[in-house]
Each structure stands twice: as structure tokens, then as C-alpha cells.
Image (tube, rainbow, N blue to C red):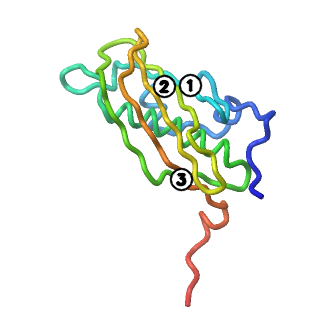
Amino acid sequence: MTEHAPANVNGLEWAARRGLGALADKMGMRFTEFTVDRAVATMPVEGNTQPVGLMHGGAYVVLGESLGSMSANLYAGPGRLAVGVDINATHTRSATSGLVTAVCTPVHLGRSLTVHEIVVTDDQGRRCSTIRITNMIKDVESATSPAPTA
């Protein structure tokens, strides 16, 4: 049986120790809630826009992938690594100022696959983007071992 994150793990502390990565830092992401069942992050619109001043669709996807992948890795637990294998997004509104907030919830938490949905809203609570990410969970050893030679 796969060992998943213990219920008493403080997800925010775990994420802070692991780090969010250079891209998340550049984009101004801030995790505000982080458990296996729900993760929340904010990101400023400013600095993450298209030339016409609208939030860049790719910025929504980076936010969603960051939350979904980190959530899958928290769920995977020690000795396991979650890696993204599929992501899709539907953008329904463009934020133009303030912060966007992303809420990530699991759709499926399995032995070898996780699926998360991330809903991104603007400061008025209006949905801007819906992202779905699938992560494959691997043993760390198999994820980092060289391929066998013949």
C-alpha cells in the first residue's frame, strides 16, 4: 500500500520547506491554505498580463499547475514524486487588476494518478479560468534512476 501524507502534516510548512520554484516566485504566487483536500493561492494580475493589460491565459495555467502539482506531491507522501502528465484550461473571463485567487480540490486521488480541478477567480469572485491537471505518482527511485542497460 502506498504511504500518503500523514493527516497531521502542515501543508503550508511542507510547501515552504520544499519551495514553490523560481517561476512561482517571479509571478508573485502566495499559498494561503494547503492541505491534501484543498489548496489556495493568490497571484497579482500586475506583471502577469498580455500586452493589452489582460491577465495572460498562460499565467492562469502556471498558477493552476503549481497548485495541482504541489497538492499531488503532498498527497503522494515520502519517497514518491508526482509529475504532471496532462493539463487543460478553459478561460471564461479576464482579470485586469488586483489579485486572482485559485482554489485547488482533488477530483481523484488514486494509487498512481491524481486529478485536481483549480478554479481561478478575480477580486469580485467571478470565475476567470478552470484548470484540470492529472499527475502520475512514481517512486522517487524509479523517477530518478537511470534506464537499465542491456
The quadrant of the rendering that contains the N terminus is: bottom right
Residue 27: quadrant of the picture: top left
Give the residue pinned by disc 1.
40
Q: Position of residue 36 (x, y in %)?
A: 66, 36
Residue at 74% from the left image edge and 56% from the top image edge: 2
Please state if 110 lies on the left or on the right of 6 as rendered: left
Q: Position of residue 117 (x, y in %)?
A: 49, 35
**Residue density around tag 2, few if under 14, some if 14–19, many if 20 or more, within 10 Å:** many
Tell me whether circle 1 and circle 2 mark residues in contact (CB < 8 Å). Answer: yes
Measure the C-alpha gap from mark 3 to mark 2. Answer: 20 Å
Please state if 48 lies on the left or on the right of 35 as rendered: left
Residue 91: quadrant of the picture: top left
Which of pointers 1 and 2 lies earlier in the amino acid sequence? 1
Judge by depth and name the residue closer to the eye, 136 or 111: 111
**Residue density around tag 1, few if under 14, some if 14–19, many if 20 or more, within 10 Å:** some
Residue at 67% from the left image edge and 31% from the top image edge: 35
Q: Callout 2, which amino acid?
A: Ala
Q: Position of residue 108 (x, y in %)?
A: 58, 44
Which of pointers 3 and 1 lies earlier in the amino acid sequence? 1
Judge by depth and name the residue closer to the eye, 27 or 106: 106
Judge by depth and name the residue closer to the eye, 121 or 48: 121
**Residue density around tag 3, few if under 14, some if 14–19, many if 20 or more, within 10 Å:** some
Give the residue pinned by disc 2.
102
41 above or below 141? above
Q: Residue furthest left?
A: 52
Measure the C-alpha gap from mark 3 to mark 1. Answer: 20 Å
Which of pointers 3 and 2 lies earlier in the amino acid sequence? 3
Q: Callout 1, which amino acid?
A: Val
- Badge 1 marks a residue whose secondary structure is strand
Give the residue pinned by disc 3.
83
